[in-house]
Image (cartoon, helix red, strand yellow):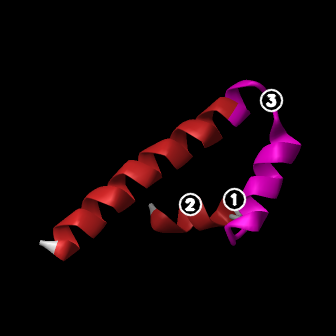
Amino acid sequence: MRQLICLVMMILLSACVSQYEAELSQHGEWQELGAYHGEYGYQEWEKNAWTDLA
């Protein structure tokens, strides 16, 4: 039961995060979005990384 509650909490939090990121990108707040990604440890993606997956 405890694991289920943790899973639900994580899903709810991830939904909030993705909305925040979408809002920043829609308003062109690229510097704020970059700071947010850096704060949470996101890694920079290379253009070639997507072509390697195909």
Residue drawn at x 66%, y 64% as measured from the top left = 48
Residue 32 lies, with reference to residue 25, above or below; the image says below
Percent coordinates x, y for residue 35 in the rendering? 82, 56
Q: Which residue is mark 3?
A: 28
Element carrying mark 1: helix
Amino acid bearing label 2:
Thr
Work out which quarter of the rendered image holds the N terminus and state it: bottom left
Q: Residue furthest left?
A: 1
Amino acid bearing label 1:
Lys
Residue drawn at x 72%, y 59% as measured from the top left = 37
Q: Which residue is mark 2?
A: 51
Magenta stretch containing residue 9, yes or no?
no
The magenta stretch is: 24-43
Distance CA(mark 2)–CA(mark 3): 26 Å
10 Å neighbourhood of mark 1: few (<14), some, or many (≥20)? few
In the picture, the disc for residue 4 is none
Q: Residue furthest right?
A: 31
Q: Nearer the viewer, mark 1 or mark 3?
A: 3
Q: Are marks 1 and 2 in contact (CB under 8 Å)?
A: yes
Element carrying mark 2: helix
Earlier-in-chain disc, 2 versus 3: 3
Earlier-in-chain disc, 1 versus 3: 3
Q: Decide if residue 5 is on the left or right side of residue 21.
A: left
Work out which quarter of the rendered image holds the C terminus and state it: bottom left
Residue drawn at x 63%, y 42% as measured from the top left = 21
Q: Which residue is mark 1?
A: 47
